[in-house]
Amino acid sequence: MYPFIRNGDVLTIKPLDPSELRTGDVILYSTADNRALAHRIVKKENQNDQLMLLMRGDSLMSGDGWIQSVCIMGHVESLKRSEKIILLNQGALNFLAKVWVKIHPIGPLSIKLASKLEQIISFLGRSL
């Protein structure tokens, strides 16, 4: 979920009625192979009277596919990074999350480009 969630962040998960979920929210859910993933909702649909959510990690080009709302374990409310608490669903970060969903695939491509540039700069720095 980089860049919004990073390795080492501690997530606070809260229960939430699935009907309250919005595109751009990050949820923790159980996969078919019993893994827990925290990814972002990119689309919501009702299919056969069942709420279905299309999920994707922020740095991924392709989505996880559709999940049923019964797979939801909770809603990611905040994260703790070092000693700082970051609320995910308020203010500028909430706005950025909604923009991030809309600009796909530019966001993941920009992450890959930044990573490659960082590698090149590091390599050049060692070569000089």
Image: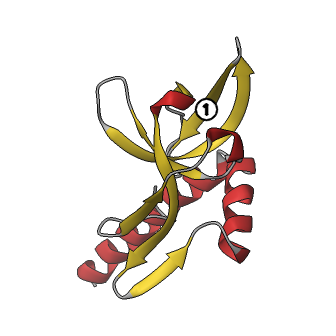
Residue drawn at 74 percent across, 58 percent down? 99
Q: Compare residues 124 and 50 and report the one nearer the observer.
A: 50
- Residue 61 place in picture, x, y as percent: 54, 40
Residue drawn at 33 percent across, 84 percent down? 82
Residue drawn at 70 percent across, 40 percent down? 19
Kindly indicate the quadrant of the structure image that contains residue 41.
Answer: top right
Residue farthest to the bottom, as pictured:
83
- Residue 30 place in picture, x, y as percent: 38, 34
128 above or below 98? Answer: below
Residue carrying label 1? 54
Residue drawn at 73 percent across, 51 percent down? 103
| Within-10-Å neighbours for mark 1: few <14, some 14–19, many 20+ | some
Q: How many marks?
A: 1
Helix, strand or loop at label 1? It is strand
- Residue 36 place in picture, x, y as percent: 34, 41
- Residue 58 place in picture, x, y as percent: 53, 51
Residue farthest to the left, as pictured:
126
Residue farthest to the top, as pictured:
48
Q: Compare residues 82 and 121 and report the one nearer the observer.
A: 82
In the displayed structure, does residue 116 sit left or right of residue 47?
A: left
In the displayed structure, does residue 73 sit left or right of residue 55?
A: left
Tell me which colouring the rendered structure shows.
secondary structure
Hey, what amino acid is under mark 1? Leu
**Quarter of the figure with the C terminus:** bottom left
Kindly indicate the quadrant of the structure image that contains residue 33.
Answer: top left
51 above or below 19? Answer: above
